[in-house]
Image: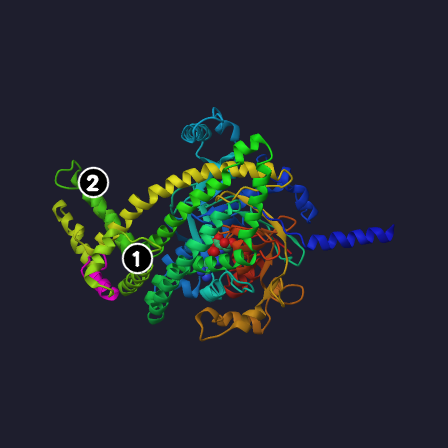
Amino acid sequence: MKKQSLVLVIFLFSFRLAFAVEGMWLPMLLQQLNEDEMKSMGMKISAEDIYSINQSSLKDAILLFGRGCTAEIISDEGLILTNHHCGYGQIQRHSSIEFDYLTDGFWAMSRAEELPNPGLSVTLLIRMEDVTSKVLEGVKPDMTEKLREDKIKNNIRLIEKNAMEGTSYAAKVRPFYYGNEFYLFITETFNDVRLVGAPPSNIGKFGGDTDNWMWPRHTGDFSLFRIYVNKNNEPADYSPENVPYKPKHHLPVSLKGAEKGDFTFVFGYPGTTKEYLPSYGVEMITEHQNPPAIRLREKRLDIFDSFMKQSDLVRIQYSAKHAGVANFWKKMIGENRGIKKLDALNKKRQLEDDFNKWAAEDPRRIEKFGRLLSEFEAIYSKLTSLKTDETYLIEAGLSVETFRFSYAFGQLQAYNKNSKTTDAELNELIGKLKTSGDNFFKNFHQPVDQHVFAEMMKDWFSHREAGSIPAGLLSASKKYGENFDAWAEATYSNSMFTDQSKLNAFLDGYKPSKYRKIEKDPVFILAGSVYDHYIRVIQPEVRLLNARLDSLQRIYMEGLMEFQPDKRFYPDANSTLRVSYGLVDDYSPADAIHYRHYTTLEGIMEKEDPDIDDYVVDPKLRALFQSRNYGRYAAPDGTMRIAFIASNHTTGGNSGSPVLNADGHLIGVNFDRNWEGTMSDLMYDPDQCRNISLDIRYCLFVIDKLAGAGHLVSEMTIIE
Ligand code: ARG
Ligand code: GLU
């Protein structure tokens, strides 16, 4: 008997270590769908502790940060933590050659030094609610898709309106499982969010784009902000009178660390996943969209690189742009490799064959699901060529910055001699355009964009059978034959959208009769033809096909759920609050290679290379390493832990998300995925997919020992 139970324990233990759970789950359904499993994996708190509408819970500390990241509240004075790369835009905007916070870091030593960030907001979820039956009220099975959609839209409008009535909250209904279910989200948004601290880039971006999407990783990817509110603790626009926000909950910070097999969960705002696409969709993305996008981005990055090396100003101007372009470029490469290694297309095809066999088994299924996959196939074959066109249009055409910038000046066309608009309205628009010019030219270096233009056109024109070229570009290029550099040179030197002084001279004393000059501007003309092609030729057809796909995907989702009744389905990510959970775990990316689950400061010293930007080590960090002055932030084995990996299913948008332990205490900040696992947006592999988190002890160590900002650590609730 004793022996038997020992065997059982060993069995359970080894089972636990292999435990990886795919999925991004709805916080309000955890109790029903996940709590038992989470507890069996080691969780000590309850689903109600994570999400509750009756009492304060962890969800009251989780924020949507800006448009695409997550942040968490870590003190009762509204201090919030997110990634360095999530605050990057703000840090950059406060940086200049004189105050180079990007390079040197920034630390507010008092509240008065915290820097406001116009345009930045953070949003809290107040509660969510299943409103499926209300949304589908009056929807009949035999309705046309159009009628169905109208009915649903109307119902949603009413639900949102009622939910907001008498509150200062926002309400939004979002579809889940491709329109099979609907949830209402009540949220509160804060607009006065100030920068509190950021490490120098050689910590916050250590490893740079070289290490991005990769494990082993040593990036100190964090930054600190603070929410300010009015005297009644309510959201308010920026005002010097505002005070720090008093949250309902802030996350306690644990110094206990993360070891192999430990339960963890990630609470945040994953952006988009497409786990239930048919094989045709995955094929379109990985074989027709990713490859040209990868190649075009590579060319753009080479140009950025060569100019950024030559000038500090250009380096600052293009740093955020470079990071953005490089990030998705590398993601697509990893995704394509992962899909291939996983043999994902064949797995999908197998599932589809089985689904079709099942659907053929009875007349009702034949009627409802029998033609689904062949319809998918027909639509995707049309969509694939359009989406390839679109890829070139966006990745080649709209990667030219002056195209995107100049297009807005078309608004002036409405202000012609005959229009009824007043001078005041015209002046307001001119003012706006001037401001947009200030913002644009602050981070613009003409030779960079001119080179991008030449290279993008060269590539696009040599792949015209794949990505159809707008008529305006074709005709304008004629004069220059194959000489794209000459075309670029002529276009850029004859345009006013490439030079702020020319543009301002034109805008000063603007009269409607001057509009002709815009219409004749070579950059404006080319931009117009690119947008025109997109808006008139590509977009309407894509919309039409997508609408048909939406309804097919809805029925397919319903069919999959019926076909696999024992499978627990999670809805694809859609930028709503989710919980992913898993265990701290190592992995083996390839034959004979094994990756440990954590990295240490030793690894930073090993990577150090003063000649390579990405691997310059901060001298203060080196000194702290040499004296092993880690204080209470050291791991029990005496090392300084930098990052760790776990099998939480995450995606873009989860950046900055808290990584919590079995007690619901903060042990890390999610900031990336491993390259071998980036296909998890399309198909998850428990064996290969890991999320990468900053170890919170390294974060505190940097704040306290390196930056000397221990007052910020004192604000937090530290669990030793
Ligand atoms: N790959 C991470 C994410 O998708 C980090 C990106 C920022 N870092 C960088 N080196 N570009 O956002
Ligand atoms: N870095 C990503 C973000 O900004 C998270 C990595 C991922 O895609 O999982 O959200």
Residue 80 place in picture, x, y as percent: 50, 51
Mark 2 residue element: helix
Residue 585 place in picture, x, y as percent: 64, 58
Q: Earlier in the sequence, mark 2 or mark 1?
A: 1
Within the magenta stretch, is there residue 41? Answer: no
- Which residue occupies 47% across, 26% down? 142
Which circle, 2 or 1, is nearer the viewer?
1
- In the image, 696 versus 262, the foreground residue is 262
Type of the residue with mark 1: Val
Residue 308 place in picture, x, y as percent: 35, 68
Q: Is residue 578 visible?
A: yes
Residue that badge 2 annotates:
425
For this orientation, the residue located farthest to the right is 1
- Which residue occupies 13% across, 46% down? 511
Above or below, 31 against 254 in this view is: above
- Which residue occupies 51% across, 43% down? 246
Colour option used: rainbow
Query: Hey, which quadrant is residue 523 in on the image?
Result: bottom left
| Residues in magenta, as a range | 484-499
Mark number, residue 400: 1
Mark 1 residue element: loop
How far apart marks 2 and 1 lie (CA) works out to 30 Å
Where, quadrant-wise, is the C terminus in this rendering?
Answer: bottom right
